[in-house]
Amino acid sequence: MTDVQSKTWWKGPREQTGAASIPQPHTDGPAQLSRRRFLEAAGFVVSTAAVSGCGRAPVETALPFGVHPEGVQPGRMKHYASTCLGCAAGCGLLVGTRDGRPLKMEGIPEHPLSKGGLCAVGQAVPLGLYDSQRLTHPLKGREKAEWSAIDDDVIAALKQAEQDGGVVRVVTGTVNSPTLQHCIDTFLGQFTDGRHVSFDPISSSAILDAHARTHGKRVLPHYKFDEAKVIVSFGADFLGTWISPVEFTAGWRTQRVPDESDAEMSWHVHLEGRMSLTGSKADKRYRLTPNDYGLVLSHLAVRLGELAGRTLNDVPPSAASPIDDADLDHISGQLWKHREACLVLCDSQDVQVQVLVNYLNELLGNYGKTLDIARPSRQRLGNDRELIDLIEDLRAGKVQALLVAGPDLTHNLPNRREMAELVAKVSLVVSLAERVNDFAELAHFVCPDHHPLESWLDAEPISGVVSLCQPTIRPLGNTRSILESFAKWSGRKATAYDIVRATWRDTIMPRQHKTQVFADFWNQSVHDGFVQVDPLPSEAHEFRPAVVKYGDRNASHTGASLELYAKIGMPDSRHSHNPWLQELPDPISKVTWDNYVCMSPKTAARLDATDGDVVRVEVVGGEAIELPAFIQPGQHDDLFSVALGYGSKGTERFADVGPQWFEARTTVGENGLVGTNVASLLAIGNETVGYVRSDVKVTKTGRRHDLATTQEHDHIEVPAAVAPHGAERREVVQETTLSAFRVDPKSGAVELHHDVEHQLWDEDHPKNGHAWGMVIDLNACTGCSACLIACQSENNVAVVGRDEVRRQREMHWIRIDRYYSGEGDDIEVAHQPMMCQHCDNAPCETVCPVLATVHSEEGLNEQAYNRCVGTRYCANNCPTKCGGSTGSNIHTTTYCRIWCSIPT
Amino acid sequence: MQRMIVTVILVVGLGFSLMVLASGVGLWHLPDNQQGYSPPQPIDYSHRLHAGELNINCRFCHSGAWESRHAGIPSTDVCMKCHKFVTDSFDVMQAELKRAGDAKEKPQTMVSDELRKLYDAFGLDKDLKPIDGVEPKSIPWVRVHNLPDYVRFSHKAHVTAGVSCQHCHGPVESMERMSQFSSLSMGWCVDCHRESTEAGINGKQVHASTDCSVCHH
C-alpha cells in the first residue's frame, strides 16, 4: 500500500480533474407538458383542495375479523420463516407480515448459509407480489381462460406429443428444490424422450463440467470463504453476483475484521478486466482481460507444480504472463504458504480453464478443506450442454412439447428471431412465467406460477441443508403453483402443500436422526425455515491429473474484447419489473435505470467518448448493439463490459415513472424499454455459453443518451481560501495497514478538533436518558447496497425515475459514497455508507422556519413531516448532504436500523 | 360620503361577526375535531349494558389494547362466546322458559332483532345452526375515534404505563351508544404527557416524552 496519508480520494472523473459537477437536465426529447396545461392542472388542484377541505370527516368503517385467526394481532408485525427465491442461492428469509400482508424481508440469523444476511434483490422481493402486471389468471393464446379448460388441452396435447415421438422438454433455471425436481422427473417419466434442461441466464456450467472431467462427477463445490486465508479470484465476483454472494460475503467477512488481540486478515487478490464489487474490496487488484485467465493460471500452475514437486504431462506456456513474474512468484508463494487454507476461483466459461483451476486447488490441497465436493453446492446447476442440445433438437424439428418455467428463454438467448421461428414449429408450447415475457408471447398456454411469497416450495442449496418456502398470503390472483401444474399434467391432483409434505416425509425425514415423528419434524422445520440433514451420497472420484492441460500456451491475447456480466441490482431479467432494483445505483458505477458500455478512461479518450455518448459495439462478423458509454476507472484498456438482463419486455411501464411535471422526461430509452438487451452478443460454444467475445469493434455514433448517475451528487467542497475555520476539507477516508495496526490499533485515525470560536446556540441539548449511536464497520462493508433497498422497503421510499435522478432528486435515505484513489492499474476503491449523522448542533434544525426538524431528548434529529412546508433549507444547510435533495422534504432524519447483507 | 357609509357598514359588520365568534368560542371545534361524535352503529350495541351493568372487563373484547397499537374491535366470534346462549333480553328468555315449563314443552329459541343481525353476520340460521357454505362475515362498525394518518398512537404503550381506558374514552360504562369523549387534539395529548411526567400516573413515576417523533414518525 502506498503512503496512506498522501492519497487523494475522488468520486468521479469530473471531481478528479476539478471540473464543475453541476448536473444538467436531459438534452433528449421535448418537454411533455405545456404551460397552459400546467396552469389548468394547478387551478384544478387548488380548487379541489379548497373544496375538499371544507367537508366533515368522512365516515369510516372498521371491519373486525369474522373469526379471529390464532396468533394474529392487527397492527403487529409477525414473522414467518421461509426461503428467498430471488435467485437459487437459497438464503433464509424471515417474512414480516402485518395485517395479513407480507411487507418486509429479513434474513434468518440462525441460517447456516446466509447467517442472517439478505441482498438487495432479496430485500426487493415483496414489490413483485403486489405488481399490477403480474398475471392473475392463465392464458390460452392471448385470451383469459379457465384452469380446467387449459389442463384438458395441455393433457390432450401431451398425449398427442407422446404418440408423435414423445420428445418433451422442460426448461427451468437451477432447480435446487427436491420437491420440484421430483415433480418434473415424474412428469417427464411419462414420455419416451422426456428431458429436463437446466438453464441459467448467468451460468457457471464450466465449473461443473470441469469437475466432471477432473473428479468424474458434475458438481459445483461448496466454497468456504470463512476458512480461506488467501483468496485468488480470476473475475469471480463472489461478493456481488457470483453463485451465492450473501453466503460468501458472510464467510469472507470473518477473515476481514482484525481484532486488537489477534490482528489477522485474509489476503485477497483479484484479477479482472472490469471493475467489480469484489475487485473493489480486494487487497491487491490486477487488471487482466478474461481472455488471459488461462495463461496466467498456467503460469501459476507451473510455479505451484514446482513447489509441490508435481509436473504436468504437458509443455508449459511459452508466452510471457501479462502479470509480472515477481507478482506471480509472490502470489504462488502466499498460496503455497497457506495451502489447505486458500482458494483459487474463476468465473470463466472455458472448461479447460476451469480444469486448470481445479488442478491448482488440488495442488494446494484445498479439496475437503475450503472446497467441499462431498457436500456440494446446488446453487447454480445450469447445464449449457443441455441448452445447446435443446437448440439443436429444435432446429431439427424433433421437439413435440416445450414447457418453460423460470428464465425467459427468448430474452436470454442470442437469436430471438430464430428462436421464435423454432418455437413456432413445436406443437405444444407452455410458459409458467409470472408475467407475459418474451417467451410467454410465443407460448400457446401461459400457466402463471404463484409468487414465492404465495407458495409452498423447498430448496436444498447445499447438499444437506434443506429449507422450506411457506406462503405468507393467500394467492392474490387465480394463479397455480408450479408443483400443482406438473402434478396435474402427470395425472395427479394434489395441493402444493401435500406434495411438499410427501417429499419431506419420504425423502428428507429419513436423512435425519432427531425424531421419528413426522408431525414434529415438519412443524419444527416450518418454524425454523430450514433443517440440516445427511448430505446426498457423493459420487465424486479422486482427482485425475491426466485431463489437465495448460491453456493458451502461445501468446497472450491482444485487441479489444467484450465481457457481458450481471449487475448487482439485476441478476437476471426476471427482476426487471422491480423499480427499486432499477433505481438502485450500481455499487461501483452509481448509474441507475440503464445498462451501458464500461470502458477505461484511456480507451474513452482514444474513442473521444464521454459518459452518455452512444457507441456501437460490434463483434467482428457478428451482431452489433448501441449503448451509451460509461467511463469506468480501473477497467482494462482492452475490455468493454456491458450488463445483461436489461431491455426486457414489461419495462415500457416505467416510461412515466416519477413526477410528471411540465419538464419531465421519460425514463425509457429510444427502444421504449429500460436499457438494451445484449443477449444477442452471447457466444454459444460447443460446451458452454460464453460471456466474453474477442475481436470487438467499438465506434462512436454521435448520438447521446444521458445516464442517470448519482456518483457526483451531493458533492460539496468549499474552496480552501474561503472556507470558514473548521470547515476545510478533511480526509474522507482514514486508513491504515495491517502491520501498522498490529503496532498501534489507533494508527491511521485522524482526529481533528476545532476550537469553535462563535457558538450560535448554547448547549441546549442535554441528554439525560438514552442516547443513540450507530457504527458501521467500513472494513466489512462491501458497498453491496442491500441496506439501501432495505431502507426503501421499510420506509416506503418513492422511486423517481431517470430524469429526476439526473436532477439529483433521488429519494433514497441512504447513499453509499464510492471513492477512487490512484490511476491506471492501481485503482483503489473505498465505500462509505452515508445517512443522517444526527448532529448534536444540527445545521438543519437551526434553519427550519417552521421547526419541523427538531432535536429529541435522546439526541436524534427528528423530522415532523406533517409540519414541513418544503422550504428545503434543511437540505441546503446539511454538511453531509444526507437526503439532500428529495422532492419537498428531507426524510433521512429517521433513526436508522440497518439491514446489512453482512451478518455481524 | 358614500365611501363613509360603506366603511361604517363594514366596520359594524366586522364587529358583529367578531361578537358572534367570541360568544361561540366555547362551543367551537377546530376542523377535524370530532369531539362528541356518536354515529349510529349497524347493531344497536350498548356499552352501558355490557361494560356497566354486566361489568365485563374492557379487555375481554378489546384485548389488542394490551398487545398492539390498535385496541381492536372484537371479531364476530368473540360476541358468540356469550351470545351463543344469550339470544334475547333476560326478561324475554325467562318468560319463554316459564311458558315452556308450564306447557311442558321444549323452550323455543327466542332471538331479538338486534342479535339477529349478529347471527346473520356469523352465518347462522333461525335455529342458530351454521348455514352450509356461509363464511362468518365482518360487521361494518362505524369508526368513532379516528386520528389523522400522520399520528401514530399506541394503545399498548399507554395501557402498560397505567393510563385507564376511561381517562381518554370517558365513562364508557354509562354510554348507551359510543361517543368520542375527548377532543383527541395535539394540545390535549401534550397536556397529559406533561402532567404525567410531572405527577406520575397512579403514583407511578413515568416519562411521557414530548418529542415530536414520539407520535409523528
Image: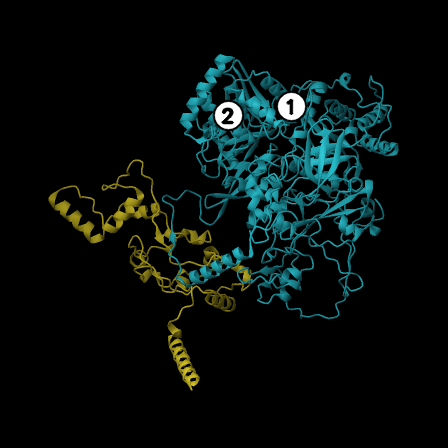
Q: Quick one: A872 or A282, which is closer to the camera?
A: A872
Which amino acid type corresponds to the residue marked 2 in the rendered image? Val
Chain letter for the cyan colouring in the rendering: A
Q: Quadrant of residue A104?
A: top right
Chain on which label 2 sits: A
In which quadrant will I find the N terminus of chain A? top right
In the image, residue A680 lies at what x, y percent? 65, 29
Q: Quick one: B152 or B51, which is closer to the camera?
A: B152
In which quadrant will I find the C terminus of chain A? top right
Chain on which label 1 sits: A
From the viewer's perspective, is residue B197 above or below residue A519?
A: below
Left or right of residue A159, residue B36 in this image: left
Chain letter for the yellow colouring in the rendering: B
Q: Quadrant of residue A381?
A: top right
In the image, residue A283 lies at what x, y percent? 78, 40
Using the rendered image of the protein, determine whether residue A100 is visible from the camera's viewpoint: yes
Label whose residue precedes the other's in the sequence (2 or 1): 1
Cα distance between the residues tagged 2 and 1: 21 Å
> Which residue lies most toward the bottom here?
B1
The residue to which callout 1 is attached is A384
Left or right of residue A361, residue A529 in this image: left
Q: Secondary structure at mark 2?
A: strand
The residue to which callout 2 is attached is A430
